[in-house]
């Protein structure tokens, strides 16, 4: 929790269009993520914004480690 002695780090807020451009995807996909509450967002009046850190967290959550010969031989493919 932020106290009066700790200033909150200001994170740049992106529009839905800018977030879509950053992910190289469609605006519709970003709006679906928002509707399904799969990405953190901020409502400012009727405007929706996504912080750069929330976008980075979403990207990190979807990151998959590459398969290597060692993990395949041991039967750890990482795929369900």
Image (cartoon, rainbow, N blue to C red):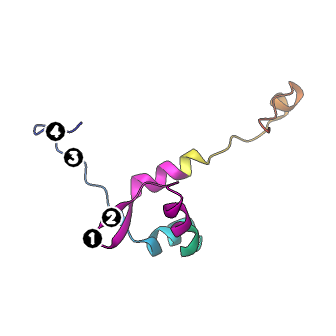
Is mark 1 in CB contact (under 8 Å) with mark 4? Answer: no
Q: Which numbered marker is on residue 8? A: 3
Q: Which residue is mark 4?
A: 6
Pinpoint residue 79: horizontal percent, then vertical percent. Answer: 79, 39
For discs 1 and 4, the disc positioned in front in the rendered view: 1
Give the CA separation, mark 2 to mark 4. Answer: 24 Å
Is mark 2 in CB contact (under 8 Å) with mark 1? Answer: yes
Is mark 2 in CB contact (under 8 Å) with mark 3? Answer: no
Give the CA separation, mark 3 to mark 1. Answer: 21 Å
- In the rendered view of the protein, which quadrant contains the C terminus? top right
Pinpoint residue 18: horizontal percent, then vertical percent. Answer: 45, 72
- In the rendered view of the protein, which quadrant contains the N terminus? top left
Give the CA separation, mark 1 to mark 4. Answer: 27 Å
Residue density around tag 2, few if under 14, some if 14–19, many if 20 or more, within 10 Å: few
N-terminal-most mark, 1 or 4: 4
N-terminal-most mark, 2 or 3: 3
The span shown in magenta is 30-58
Give the CA separation, mark 3 to mark 4. Answer: 6 Å
Q: Which residue is mark 1?
A: 45
Give the CA separation, mark 2 to mark 1. Answer: 6 Å
Give the CA separation, mark 2 to mark 3. Answer: 18 Å
Does residue 75 sit above or below 80 in this rendering?
above
N-terminal-most mark, 3 or 1: 3
Q: Which residue is mark 2?
A: 43
Is mark 3 in CB contact (under 8 Å) with mark 4? Answer: yes
Picture residue at 89% right of the left edge, 27% below the top: 73
Report the side of 18 relative to 30 (left or right). left
Residue density around tag 1, few if under 14, some if 14–19, many if 20 or more, within 10 Å: few
């Amino acid at each position: 929790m932020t106290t009066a002695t700790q200033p909150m780090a200001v994170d740049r807020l992106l529009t839905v269009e800018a977030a879509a451009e950053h992910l190289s995807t469609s605006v519709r996909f970003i709006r679906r993520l928002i509707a399904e509450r799969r990405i953190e967002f901020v409502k400012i009046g009727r405007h929706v914004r996504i912080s750069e850190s929330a976008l980075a967290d979403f990207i990190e959550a979807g990151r998959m480690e590459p398969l290597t010969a060692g993990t395949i031989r041991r039967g750890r493919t990482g795929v369900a």
